[in-house]
Each structure stands twice: as C-alpha cells, then as structure tokens.
Image (cartoon, rainbow, N blue to C red):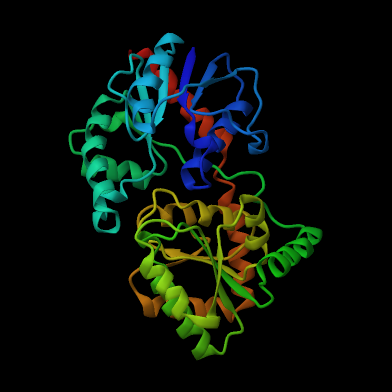
C-alpha cells in the first residue's frame, strides 16, 4: 500500500505539531511493514533536522505559491500522480484528494475556548473542521478526551470513525543517570543562568497555557513559605501573548524567562527542575507533562481535558482556575523532598505508556482500514 503524508510540519518550528509528525515518522520507521510512505513537503528537510532514514520513505518536494494552495491543490495533485492508496493530514482534508484521507485532530480548543484565539483563526478552523471530519475516512484524536470532544462538539460523527491514539515520547526523555545529572546542572546554570532551585513551565506563550495564574500562585507560595526557588518559563511567543509577557515582567526576580528552548536542552531542564508546573486550561494531550514524567521530574498540572488521562496518579492535579489551590500545591511539593521523589518515580512508570512505535502501529491499522473502505 502507498501511504501519502502531508509532512510539511516535520521541518517547521518546534511545536507539539512538529513533535507529532516527527515522532510518528520515527515510529513508522521502527514498525515492519511492506507499505511505502510518500512524504510531501514544500522544501527539502535540512540535514541537521535528523529525520529517520528508511528505504520505504519517498520524499516529494512540491512547490506552491503559498501554504493554502499547497494544501488544496498541489498536494492532492501530487498524491494522485503517485497513486497513493490513503493520505494522512492534520485538521484540513483537501476536497480534491482522490484517495481516502485520515486526519489527525490534536485538539479542538478553538471550538471549546474560542475567546483564547485570534478571531480569524477561530473562524477559519470553525468553518473548515466540520467539513473535514465529514470528508475524512477516519479521524485520529491524540487522547480519549480529544476523541470524546470531537464526538460531543460535532454531533452526528460516527463513533467508529474517530480513534484515540496517544502521542509517544522521544527517546531523549528518560530517567537521568548520575553523569547526566551533573551535565544537566551545568546546562541549567551556564546556558540558562539557573543557579537556584527552580520550577519549570514549558509551552508556547498563548492564553490557553494560563501562565499569569501560575506566576501569581508561585509568587505567593514563594513569599509565604520563604522558598529559594524561581519559576523558569520556557517558550516562544505565540498569539495574544501580551498579558503573559506583562505578567512575566511584573514578577521581577521570581521568574527567569528562558524564551525558546531547543529540544536537545529540554531533558536537562526537566532533569534539574524540582517540578514542572503546567496549568493549561485545555490540552489535546499535553506533551510537556509526559516528557517531564519520563525524565523523573515531579509534575503539577491542570485537572481538565486530557491531562488527568496522561498524568494518571503520577502528578498533583489542580483546577487551572483555582489560584489558591495552585499556591497550596506548589508549597506542598516544593517543601517535601519525599513527595517529589515519590511523584518522580511514579511519573517514570506512567510515561512508559506512551510510545511512538505503538502510536505508529495503531495509526497503520487506521490507514489499512481506511483504504479497505475506499
């Protein structure tokens, strides 16, 4: 079977979307099958992007004037020319695609919390997603929570059409050895000037990540308990980020803003942090939670959407709108080395549930079923 994949995001900015596609390709390269994979991009991936090598992977560089034309016309035309049996995209299903299409919908936060998006983006997604779900041969949600949200907010969608397939965790995220712990401390101190105990917050600076509430709760906990910690905020600027940036500036010496952190450095920060704080209002999966747990970093996260599903009993779950509860949870965790050790150990076990090879095997089964229904 020939499988065509919209692989543009594997060479995009470091986001959860890019991690998904790179992880899926890695998993597919580890999964024995006779299928051929046609990977369509707008430019050749650079050598330093370290994508998995596999003789079954056939890269197709397809030019187009812009992203919209690429998705709507250039990609379907090229996939048709290659006679692919099934195609895989994210969110938008091209109307001109001849082959059955599987679409991955990471989350529908634009539908559930539209006020946290630029109006234009929420409008366009709100218009395109319902028709994409109807046209798709199958839909993949990255958690049971996302699957349930799709079925709830798009009534009439056949339940058998929507599949929950968890994201995986890259191999770089693992328990830290003694030698790695020494190197991790050097990275944190020298590269990021983190010479005090710290709590880490990771995510694109946008309203859904709820960083201003975390900053207020952390500052209160720090002052009330006399904690030596700082809050290290890692993430590039996203949309509607002004409130978050103002809150960071107002927090003074309680916060260290790291900006964009390369993937290669994240394991060192997870390995050095006393905790990951992740107060997101909504997540389709919540990769930082899984990555931190895999490194043995204790986690405090929100108790909504997919986060309880991903964290299991290996994290402290707190309402993302209850500032006082966040203050109490931070104080409790940061003053108890025993609790941090316990959560760290449980997190390592919980994170073993998430494998890109398993995700790839389950995704292949969806491809095969979609092709058979064509």
Residue at position x 26%, y 25% in the image: 135
- Seen as rendered, the residue at the extreme left is 156
Q: Position of residue 143 (x, y in %)?
A: 41, 44
Reply above or below: 235 against 98: below
Q: Position of residue 119 (x, y in %)?
A: 24, 52
The reply to whether residue 356 is visible in this rendering is yes
Numbered-mark total: 0
The reply to whether residue 319 is visible in this rendering is no
Reply above or below: 345 against 122: below
Q: Position of residue 337 (x, y in %)?
A: 64, 76
Q: Nearer the viewer, residue 268 or 249?
A: 249
Location of residue 250 by image quarter: bottom left
Q: Nearer the viewer, residue 267 or 336?
A: 267
Residue at position x 61%, y 44% in the image: 170
Reply above or below: 363 against 335: above
> In screen coordinates, is 200 left or right of 105?
right
Residue at position x 34%, y 27% in the image: 69
Location of residue 185 by image quarter: bottom right
Which image quarter holds the C terminus?
Answer: top left
- Seen as rendered, the residue at the extreme front is 65
Location of residue 75 by image quarter: top left
> In screen coordinates, is 97 left or right of 310?
left
Q: Position of residue 78 (x, y in %)?
A: 43, 15
């Amino acid at each position: 079977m020939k499988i065509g994949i919209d692989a543009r995001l594997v060479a995009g900015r470091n986001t959860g979307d890019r991690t998904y596609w790179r992880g899926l390709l890695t998993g597919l390269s580890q999964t024995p099958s006779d299928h051929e994979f046609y990977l369509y991009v707008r430019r050749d991936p650079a050598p330093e992007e370290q994508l998995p090598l596999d003789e079954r992977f056939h890269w197709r560089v397809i030019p187009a004037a812009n992203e919209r034309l690429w998705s709507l016309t250039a990609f379907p035309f090229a996939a048709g020319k290659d006679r692919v049996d099934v195609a895989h995209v994210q969110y938008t299903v091209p109307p001109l695609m001849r082959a059955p299409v599987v679409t991955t919908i990471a989350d529908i936060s634009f539908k559930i919390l539209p006020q946290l998006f630029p109006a234009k983006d929420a409008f366009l997604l709100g218009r395109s997603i319902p028709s994409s779900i109807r046209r798709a041969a199958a839909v993949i949600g990255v958690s049971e929570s996302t699957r349930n949200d799709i079925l709830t907010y798009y009534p009439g969608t056949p339940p058998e059409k929507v599949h929950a397939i968890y994201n995986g965790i890259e191999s770089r995220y693992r328990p830290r050895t003694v030698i790695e712990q020494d190197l991790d401390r050097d990275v944190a101190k020298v590269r990021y000037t983190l010479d005090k105990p710290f709590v880490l917050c990771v995510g694109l600076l946008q309203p859904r990540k709820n960083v201003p509430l975390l900053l207020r709760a952390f500052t209160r906990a720090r002052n009330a308990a006399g904690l030596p910690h700082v809050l290290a905020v890692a993430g590039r600027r996203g949309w509607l980020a002004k409130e978050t940036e103002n809150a960071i500036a107002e927090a003074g010496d309680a916060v260290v803003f790291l900006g964009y952190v390369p993937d290669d450095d994240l394991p060192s920060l997870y390995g050095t942090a006393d905790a990951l704080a992740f107060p997101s209002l909504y997540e389709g999966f919540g990769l930082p939670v899984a990555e931190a747990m895999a490194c043995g970093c204790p986690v405090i996260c929100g108790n909504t959407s997919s986060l309880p599903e991903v964290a299991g009993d290996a994290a402290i779950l707190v309402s993302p709108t209850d500032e006082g509860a966040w203050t109490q949870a931070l104080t409790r965790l940061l003053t108890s080395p025993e609790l941090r050790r316990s959560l760290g150990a449980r997190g390592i076990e919980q994170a073993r549930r998430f494998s890109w090879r398993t995700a790839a095997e389950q995704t292949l089964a969806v491809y095969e079923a979609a092709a058979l229904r064509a």
